[in-house]
Amino acid sequence: MKSIKKYIPFLICFVFISTQILAQKNENNFIDSLMGKMTLEEKIGQLNLAVINNGVLTGTAISTGVDQKIKAGQAGGVFGTWDIDQIKKLQGLAVQGSRLHIPLLFGLDVIHGHQTIFPVPLALSCSWDTSLVKAVARTAAIEASADGINWVYSPMVDISRDARWGRDVEGAGEDPFLGAQMAKAMVEGYQGNNLMANNTVMACVKHFALYGAAMAGRDYTGVDMGRQEMYQYYFPPYKAAVDAGAGSVMASFNDVNGLPSAANKWLLTDVLRKQWGFKGFVVSDYGAINELTTRGLGDAQTIAALALNAGNDMEMVGDNYLGTLKKSVASGLVTMQTLDAACRRILEAKYKLGLFEDPYKYINVQRAKTEELTKSHLEQARKTAERTFVLLKNKNQRLPLKRKGTIAVIGPLADSKINMPGAWSVADDYHNSVTVLEGIQAALKNKATVLYQKGANITDDSLLKLRVNSFKEEITTDKRTPQQMITDAVKIARKSDVIIAVVGEAADMSGESASRTDIGIPHSQLNLLKALHKTGKPIVAVLFNGRPLTLNWENDHCDAILDTWFGGFEAGNAIADVLFGKYNPSGKITMSFPRNVGQIPIFYNERRTGRPFDENKDASKYKSDYLDVSNTPLFPFGYGLSYTNFSYGKIELSKTRLKADETLNASVKITNTGKYAGEEVVQLYITDPVARTTRSVEDLRGFKKIFLQPGESKDVTFSITPEDLKYYDYDLKYDWDAGDFIIKIGTNSRDTQSATVIWNK
Ligand code: BGC
């Protein structure tokens, strides 16, 4: 009996592998046989992704004659609709109306929730909590699939070091290690364990690659970057998403060293497929194939062939593939083999989603009614939001506030439902969101008096207003003059014990095509804050923002600053929970906050300079610094306060001399020395003082979130192996060097303790 038991794991393994092989064989046979029946036109048809007009159209290109195209087998997928009846109708056209009955993919930008809107991705990353983020993606997948969607254009994993870029809001910030963890969590959340299930959806990792390094932070510009930099700092999140099994990848709009991603064979084939082993399909971004012509790469036929040959399988919005690939096959510009490979990848995705088995599996009107915007999803949205807020300042423990006295809630974002969800929430009904004022009123009931004034328009700049309002009216202009609004606000401030000023960006002041060069709070609101400050009443600033802001005046004059990003439908309740101490904030920023725009790009893991500037000692010339501003950010990467205090003990090392095959355990005792229970994100950084190339000042290599009661201590241990010491050298060799390493553990990238080890090979 005992001896049989020994073989059970092998048996299970054998059965598992055989099932996998068999499933793969069935898939191959099915697709071989289907492709055997397809005409060249039908194969090209699968490479076309049409947009339906009720989505967010992010370019001038649109799709025409979609119904006819579907019936003629000229569309592989459709995106932009989440209307289940429409999806059912379109799937019917494909399955019943087209010659080979091939089902469609239905895609959508499900970025931070579908019907239930969660905090924006940048906020989610500030939780440093991968299970929380995975759970958000899981819920988004349940809701989106209940509306007939089987493919989501998320996660967006572009590293960004530039606060001017509007799309910071969609990513996880500046760090590749944290970005990779977030990317993996999201893919796992969307795709679940079984892509065939009717409540999982295929993820689309975007935007491959380097979109976040857009020149000057201006959307859609090109990127020139050395490969070492790409591999070391920008690629890890894309790779992590691919390793997690993401079914598709979206090529980015930008050039990469002079060749746009959609036409970049090195990127889409050599790196993605050959080096990383990606097996899914690549889709272009919106109209990006058309834009190859705009960028000067040639006419429709040339650019379509260029993109397909580079490894861009599907064209999103545009008829270049449909219109020219047949000719290109005939003339030899594209081989049949390349075209077949692209078509096969799209059919494989449909197979993996189970669409050939049941094309209507995601279309269930009952689910659409019962699985969206549920009580538990809203509860999850509230709990999630609380964990994403970052307390940037809390002078004299001004927060949490007592539930008593008179509280003035002031600001153009205090009671603005339309601005709660944040950018890229295409399927939301923003009326479902709870504003800050509503959240505070509900939290206080009759315990305190709440007074409210708008105080200012989000901006008085008419051009900014016009551009931000192009989809919906997020910025309204009050009938009163700006001065009158301020006077009215000051009046209630004087009657109050404390002012809660809800200020910042309108939702679409960040997001796609929302780059800014002045990243401060708009002047109208700063004027309001200055007037409120003159009353002498304490000010708690609650910020709405999709990117780091410059906050010098606010930091100097407000008593507390709580950064709440765009917290989604339940943000109002979640903000009240934090302001009145029901939840102790634990978020930490994942992008450095600059002191001024001139410091950008500013990020913690920059490479060492030969002339470092010591902020505390140096006044000398010829150092790497600015004459007019410090080198440091206002708030460093990883920074965020709590209502309690955490003290860090000395780093204890399991060894100080190690060999190549050994693991180092680095521990630290953390004690909650304050009065509140709370969570702390303990961060591990490593510095490599001597290497083959210039290394970063430090790199994040681990983090753990712990919960401590007042007075409680916990030992936090990080296990470090040589894998954590590796880097890409000048020749792109990924390895580590023997020698000293400085292990740093702390509460943010600036405030750490350190200990040195020697690691031999
Ligand atoms: C964006 C993508 C998005 C696509 C489809 C583009 O403009 O860059 O992130 O997925 O539109 O809406």
Image (spheres, rainbow, N blue to C red):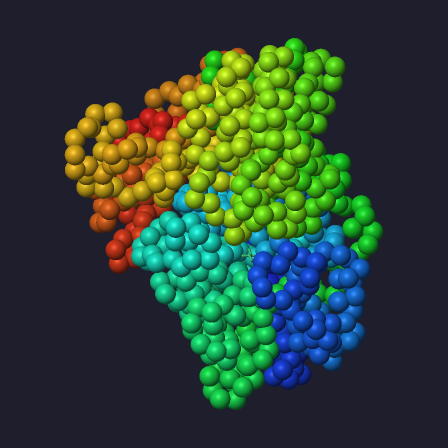
Q: Position of residue 409 (x, y in %)?
A: 63, 23
Q: Is residue 283 visible?
A: no
Q: Is residue 488 visible?
A: yes
Comparing 523 with 625, the one in front is 523
Q: Position of residue 691 (x, y in %)?
A: 23, 45
> Quadrant of the image for the C terminus?
top left
Q: Is residue 566 left or right of residue 360?
A: left
Give the vertical position of 445 relative to 683 (above or below): above
Comparing 198 with 484, the one in front is 484
How many marks can you see? 0
Give the vertical position of 373 relative to 583 (above or below): below
Q: Residue at x 47, y 87 (%)?
A: 332
Comparing 463 with 244, the one in front is 463
Q: Is residue 395 left or right of residue 667?
A: right
Q: Residue at x 76, y 40 (%)?
A: 374
Q: On the rendering, which quadrant does ligand 1 occupy? A: bottom right
Q: Position of residue 214 (x, y in %)?
A: 42, 53
Q: Is residue 206 left or right of residue 667?
A: right
Q: Residue at x 29, y 29 (%)?
A: 755
Report the residue that reaches farthest toward the bottom.
330
Give the vertical position of 520 relative to 138 (above or below): above
Identify the image quadrant of residue 497.
top right
Q: Residue at x 30, y 32 (%)?
A: 629
Q: Position of residue 91 (x, y in %)?
A: 75, 67
